[in-house]
Image (cartoon, grey):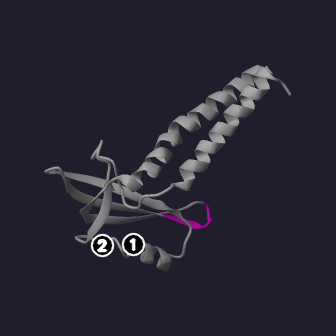
Amino acid sequence: MDTLFLLIGACVGAGLLYAFGPPFWASLDAQRWERTNAIVVNVVRESLQRSGGPTWYQLRVDYRYDHRSVTRTAQAFIGHRQLKPELIDLATAPYQPRQVIEIYVDRKNPSETELTPGIKYGYLLASLFGLAVMAFAAYGMFVGF
């Protein structure tokens, strides 16, 4: 029975690593992507409040860009934030409709873009947690506790 739980844990860890590992590596690579201009099409501020708790906001920026003679559209989500509404307004200030912004485009896959290159720490933490769960399960199965 213990082996079954360890096997399930290993599968959960592998799933986390599979789901969050590639976006983490892509975020590291995005610093070397090609810069280009885009036009903001729409900015959406979504809010969620559960049973009297704090309000969480997510910002979605829709933008259009031309790359290699092809016009493409994309969107970027700017995190889940528990902030005051006036701070959310500050976060949306750089992204107004019809405004020109700079984005980063993957040369190998031009449909992949980033607004801000750099390490995405959420993906890093989820990947490391998945790796730790897999290591714990492997240790439990092969060495024992």
59 or 126, nearer to the observer:
126
104 or 133, nearer to the observer:
104
Q: Residue 20, position in %: x, y?
A: 52, 42
Q: Residue furthest left?
A: 69
Q: Which residues are magenta?
A: 51-57
Question: Is residue 78 rendered to the left or right of residue 50?
Answer: left
CA gap, disc 2 to disc 1? 7 Å
* Quarter of the image where the N terminus is located: top right
Circle 2 Cα neighbour tier, 10 Å, few/some/many (<14 / 14–19 / ≥20): some
Q: Mark 2 highlights which residue?
A: 96
- Label number found at residue 92: 1
Q: Is residue 26 magenta?
A: no
Q: Is residue 54 magenta?
A: yes
Name the residue at 33% across, 57% down.
104
Name the residue at 60% across, 67% down.
54
Hey, which quadrant is residue 98 in on the image? bottom left
